[in-house]
Amino acid sequence: QVQLVESGGGLVQPGGSLRLSCVASGSIFSINNMGWYRQAPGKQRELVARIRSTGETAYAGSVKGRFTISADNAKNTVYLQMNSLKPEDTAVYFCTADIYDLEGLVTPWGQGTQVTVAS
């Protein structure tokens, strides 16, 4: 069974930085896409950034220029470097991925990591 585990969340002051990591484990044949979503209290989950196996990236307008998504395919890991953080970035951040394993294509979600931006 494929699992995703996020780490790197925490409390940071406005203007600060955090780096989130998400590691995929299990019987993985290949990973096509990996992405980060976030969900703030009372709001719907929204896409933050995604990266394709080709390296192509896409970002939500609210984070473009501040966040950078990257992946280490050898480690089945995706990162989210978050700079110039704002209070409105406060949310639980989840990673997800399109993964081919023994059962075919699966799209698991991690358990989430809390990011709080406050002074």
Image (tube, rainbow, N blue to C red):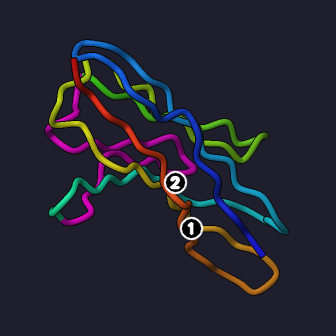
| For marks 2 and 1 on the same chain, the one whose residue lies earlier in the sequence | 2
Is the residue 19 above or below the residue 119 in the image?
below
Residue 30 image point, x, y percent: 73, 62
Residue 16 lies left or right of residue 1; in this view the side is left
Is the residue 62 above or below the residue 28 in the image?
above
Residue at position x 72%, y 47% in the image: 76
Residue 83 image point, x, y percent: 33, 18
Say if mark 2 contacts mark 1, CB within 8 Å: yes
Is the residue 69 above or below the residue 65 in the image?
below
SS state under label 2: strand
Q: Which residue was labeled with disc 1? A: 98
Q: Residue furthest bottom?
A: 103
Assess whether residue 59 is covered by the magenta stretch: yes
Q: Residue furthest top?
A: 15
In this rendered view, identify the residue nearer to me: 92 or 34.
92
SS state under label 1: strand
Q: Which residue was labeled with disc 2? A: 34
| Residue segment shown in magenta | 44-65
Residue 118 image point, x, y percent: 23, 24
Residue at position x 59%, y 40% in the image: 7
Residue at position x 70%, y 65% in the image: 3
Amino acid on which the number 2 mark rests in the picture: Met
| Quadrant of the rendering where the N terminus is positioned | bottom right
Amino acid on which the number 1 mark rests in the picture: Asp
Residue 108 image point, x, y percent: 58, 71
| Quadrant of the rendering where the C terminus is positioned | top left
